[in-house]
Structure formats: structure tokens, C-alpha cells
Image: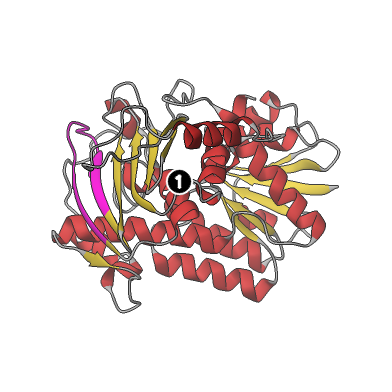
Amino acid sequence: MLNIAVVGTGNISRLHLLAYAAFPERCRVVALCDVVPERAEEKKREHGLDDAVVVSSHEELLARDDIDLVSVCTPPSTHAQISIDLLRAGMNVLCEKPMAPSLTECDAMLAAERESGKTLSVVAQNRFRDDIATLKEAVDSGLVGPVSHLRIDSAWWRGVPYYDLSWRGTWESEGGGPTLNHAIHHIDLMLWMLGAPRAVAAMMTNAWHDNAEVEDLSVALLEYDRAIAQLTSSVVHHGEEQQLVLQGRDASVAQPWAVHAEVTQPNGFPAPDGNADLVERLDALAAAHVALEHQGHTGQIGDVLSALEDGRAPAVDGEAGRRTVEVVTAIYQAAIERRTVDLPIPPDSPYYTGEGILGSAPRYFTKTRSVDDLAGSITLGGSPDPDKG
């Protein structure tokens, strides 16, 4: 039985607590931590965690020797220090996305993991979805051929009050806008399927969120060897129609699931009926997908529990979390400096430490409204909510 603590009991902690509750024979939540203890007490009552203690600082957990795994669900600017402290105290850590606002902080977290011998995992729950797993299986099958283009629409919609929450909407506290805090999931999927790009070009703006310094929309082009990825990161898209479309030499596959396969006429134009046999094979591959036992946060937390039980690395490790932050950093640098940025980002770059972003990023609006909590629930538009299943 693994003992669990959750640090930060805001909205996202609910998904962690529901996920741990799905494995009652394998783990139990023994501690909740929040700088607003009343919020932690509310979560304790809501989830029936009668035996869990409530503390107001993660430092109160460091001397305990009975905690095996801690979910870090605090604002992004605090992820690094909290995770490092917990790892050095001998606890395994599952850190919410984004891993940290800067590569320097990511590297410090990875160093603490190595030095402590404990495990660090970063949340990338979309890998644990049947539709995404099916897309990955299609790409890995080789049936689509070499990928030439990937289009990602990380399209979300958030109203103006979204940035009234105290830690949102500034470069210092949130680290950025939807490029970092929403599209990071899609960036992880891109890296999972295609590997790392070698260069990035981008533009960004704040279209109408007037209580946020940060961008609410960016568009990036990511260069691969003989391939290009196209990423829109947004909280201004009505309908939240998210999509991934991979174009291969022989066929295209997409999420939501769609398949197309053209064949040529002698004149180079597509034949009217396309490659029906290949479409059928890809549809059969999708139909043969074995449904995941758990999806979303529950799927990833189940994997982390198994990793700790079996003494193996989790499916999503700290290095994966760092790679997504590096791509986001390159997108911001490219947009701020209005030039193409090569990857990897060298350690002597001011953007490596985050100083380049903090010192040069446009402050689109001045944040003038700040509240500690917002009423309402988290809704996930544009795709099924994997954490409800």
C-alpha cells in the first residue's frame, strides 16, 4: 500500500484525488497541503478522506518517512522548489504540467531526482486516451509512411474572468499563456509521435483577455527533417475544436479518427477512389485497439503506481516533461525575437534560465483584478473528458 500526499488542492487536484480513489487496494491519501488550509479541508470532506491530515506548507511533510508519492498541483512557478524539496526528502513526485517555467528549473528537478534515487513523473494524461493511443499505433505501424506534416489545433476558449485568478495571467507567476499551459499537452503528443524538431518560428498576441500580461493565442511552425509541424495554441477558439492531423507519404490519419489515402493517376492528380485497401487496413488497426483500462489522469497515475511497485521508470518521466518546456521556450523566443530559433536551446541562452522571457516578453495588458478562487467547474470542450470514465 503506497501512501500519497497532494500538495495544492485547487481545481486540478480533484482529478488526482479521483484517480487515487480508483486504486483503493494500492494506495491511500494520507495528507493534503494547501496555503489556504480551508480549501484542503473542503477537498478532504468532498472526497471522504477522513484519515488524511491537512497542512499549510509542503515543508511540514518533509520530515515524514511514511509518504511514498506526492502529487504537486500548485501554480507552475512553484513546481520546481516544491518538487526538489520533496525528492531530496526521499519522496517520489508526480508534478502537474508544465514541469517548470524554465529549463534551468527543469534541470534542477532532474538533478534532484538523480541525486535522491527517487522517481519524478510529469503529467501528460492525454497519452492515456484511447483515441490518442490509436493514433500513435497507426503512426508506429508504418502504414502511413514517413510523416511530412502534422497539424495541431490546441483550441480552447476561456472567458475574461479566467485570468482573474491570482496566479494566472503574468509571465512571472504562470510562465506564459496557452502555449505553456494548454498546448503543452499537444506538444508532448507531437514529441511522443515525431521526436524533437530542429527549429521553430512563431507569432503570438493577446486578442482580448484584458486582465492578462500573457498571450492568449500563438501560432508556431516546427521544422523536422523533411517535415513540418503546425501548432495553434489558443484560449480564444469558440467550440474548442481540437484536432491532430498527420499527413504521411501513403495516408493521413487524424484525431478525431479519420483516414485518407490517395493514389496517383498517370498525370499526378489523385485517382477518384484513392487507396481503399490501405484505408481499410488502417480502419481495421483502429478497430483492433485494445481499450485502456483507465484513461486520463487515472491512467497515468495507475502507471506511476505500477512503476513504483515494479521498480521501473514511469511511461512519462521528467525528461519528457523537460522536452515539452524546451519547445515552448523556443516558441516564445521565436515570437519575441521575430526570428527562427534552433533547437536545442544552449545553456548560455538567456531563455534557458527564463530571464529572456521575463525580460523581453510583451506585457499585453496590466493585470488589475486578482482573486484567490473562482466559482464553477473545469469543463473540457472539444474532446471527451477521459477522467470521467
Label 1 SS = loop
- The residue at the point 62 percent across, 68 percent down is 113
> Considering depth in this image, is 29 or 286 the residue closer to the camera?
286
For the record, the magenta segment spans: 200-221
Residue 111, quarter of the rendered image: bottom right
Q: Position of residue 74 (x, y in %)?
A: 51, 46
Taking the magenta stretch, the answer to whether it contains residue 165 is no
Q: What residue would you read off at disc 1? A: 144
Residue 382, quarter of the rendered image: top left
Q: Is residue 272 above or below residue 306?
A: above
- The residue at the point 61 percent across, 24 percent down is 388
Can residue 73 be seen here? The reply is: no
Q: Position of residue 354 (x, y in %)?
A: 32, 64
Q: Residue furthest front?
A: 266
Can residue 196 be seen here? The reply is: yes
> What crowding class fits label 1: few (fewer than 14 Cα within 10 Å), some (14-19), or many (20 or more)?
many
